[in-house]
Image (cartoon, grey):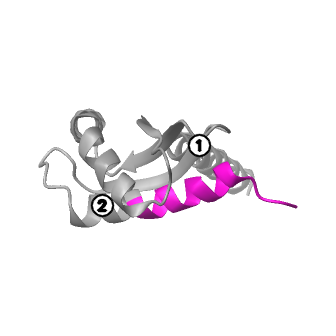
Amino acid sequence: MEFKRSHRVGETILKEVSEILNRGLKDPRVGYVTITAVDVTPDLSIARVFYTVIGDEKERHQTGEGLAKATPYIRRQLSQRLRMRRTPEIEFRYDTSIDYGNHIESLLKDIENERSDDDQGDN
């Protein structure tokens, strides 16, 4: 299968944004952030950067605000690191898939616990 250029650019942006957040961002609102994926439009004009945060809803909200405030800085850093004619616009979005996966996992554990309780009750 042939990779699209947008996929390759997305992988590069993921690596670079992760490094920028780890080394160059000093906003106290942005705590421990993990970049999970980057989706780049086929025309390379927009890069949607998906992230997760360890913490509660308040920390998630503060991190979102910090990332929104830092977006111009991150885009400038990307433009210096990427060898592209035009750097994509950056949109940060919280990745809900991990929360959804954790929810499904807890439901499965509840079902397993109910089954083990039923099995013990039958004895």
Q: Per the image, is 58 magenta?
A: no
Q: Where is residue 64 in the image (x, y as percent from the top left)?
A: 29, 36
Q: Where is residue 110 in the image (x, y as percent from the top left)?
A: 59, 45
Q: Mark 2 points at which residue?
A: 20
From this viewpoint, is residue 106 visible? no
Label 1 crowd bin: few (<14), some (14–19), many (20+), radius 10 Å: many
Q: Give the range drawn in magenta.
A: 1-16
- Which quadrant of the figure has residue 33? bottom left
Disc 1 element: strand
Q: Name the residue under label 1.
A: 40
Q: Is residue 119 left or right of residue 77?
A: right
Q: Is residue 51 left or right of residue 24?
A: right
What kind of residue is marked 1? Val
Q: Residue at the spot x=73%, y=58% of the render? A: 123
Q: Which residue lies furthest to the front in this view?
A: 85
What kind of residue is marked 2? Ile
